[in-house]
Amino acid sequence: MNASPSHRPHPAEWTETQSLLPSAERDLPAGRHQFHKEQMMARIHEDLRTSSRTSATSPAAPVKRSNPFLRRTILLPAAAFALAGAVLGGLALTGGGADDGRTALATGPALTTTIGVADPKGAPQLLERISLAAADTSAPTPRKGQYIYIASKVADTYIKTEGDKSEVVSDELHSRQVWNSLDGRDGWLIEAGKTSDKGITLKGDTPFTGAYNALAELPTDPDTLLQRIYRESDAVRDPEVPRDQAAFVAIGDLLFESYPPAEVGAALYKAAAKIPGVVSVDDAVDATGRHGVAIARENDGERIEWIFDKKTLRFLGERIVVVKATAGDPLKVGTVTHTSAITERAVVDANKQLPGQAS
């Protein structure tokens, strides 16, 4: 799951909206302030990682990272929020400069959906079945020197502001490819509209916490695993984010752009079943239009849904849906603030190698 960590300012709009951010936050209902801050920080965190690299024609500069795929920053230390205040008017909000190889994604009307019916009593049974499916896998075990490759389709919905006019718009659905070494210290990212066609390095001294080796060291007893997830997320989460929500998001981020060993994946699903407020959803649709069932948790009027194939219970993707209206909020019920779909997950022999290519 990753991941991860929606309705945040788009990089192409940051230079237009930075002077309006304080007033925009005051106009938002109180329940949305934290979510907007999380989304803004997630994008700032990403830009801080990518801005130090050289142009696409030069060797990419190493980028220190803690977890480059964390899509919601509830697990970032408080220092990251302090850092955000120092860069709001600078590099991160201008997209890293004119020669960084990035292009703005096209925008269109807000993504919307029909909301599936949630069943508070259905989650334990569904997660037990998902756990059994995750444990019964024939996926190959990675060898030293190999990389985990994840391909996906993603899109976000956000509030675009130009002058005194604001509107809810969505990214064009676009492709994302990630490579990760088993130790999480090397990798590569190519994302349409966010990086150059050649991509950016994810090499760094601090390993990606969802790397295969790190996941393989997690306890496989669900109770012990959940205690660890609570303990580690408590140490770094923003205090405004509920503890149970932080744990649910943490598990999702570990599942999304990763390749957990079968027994660990099964344990993560069993651990999720023990989090209060987790529900099953009878119908949810991933970014490519595949229907499935979902495991979800609602917080502050929005529901994070992990989507699974109805027959095989294979993980398909994730989406975040507005399920409760808030007075004055432009994001209406049924708005999809984030959507993703895993299209391929594989083990390859080298960084930037595609599945099926010769070494």
Image: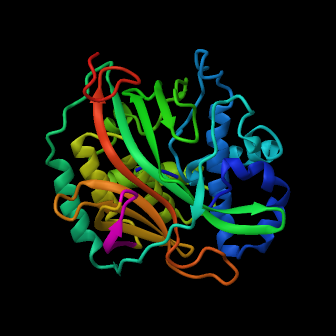
Magenta range is: 278-288
In the image shown, does 34 or 166 lie closer to the viewer?
A: 166
Q: Is 285 inside the magenta-drawn segment? A: yes
Q: Left of 270 or right of it: where is 75?
A: right
In the image shown, does 34 or 290 lie closer to the viewer?
A: 290
* Secondary structure predominantly adopted by residues drawn in magenta: strand
Quarter of the C terminus within the rendering? top left
In the image shown, does 80 or 228 lie closer to the viewer?
A: 80
Q: Is 188 inside the magenta-drawn segment? A: no
Q: Is residue 221 visible?
A: no
Location of residue 315 in the rendering, given as x and y in whole percent from the top left corner: 29, 54
Location of residue 242 in the rendering, given as x and y in whole percent from the top left corner: 55, 66
Task: Quadrant for residue 272, please give it.
Answer: bottom left
Q: Left of 81 or right of it: where is 275?
A: left
Q: Is residue 190 visible?
A: yes
Task: Quadrant for residue 307, please give it.
Answer: bottom left
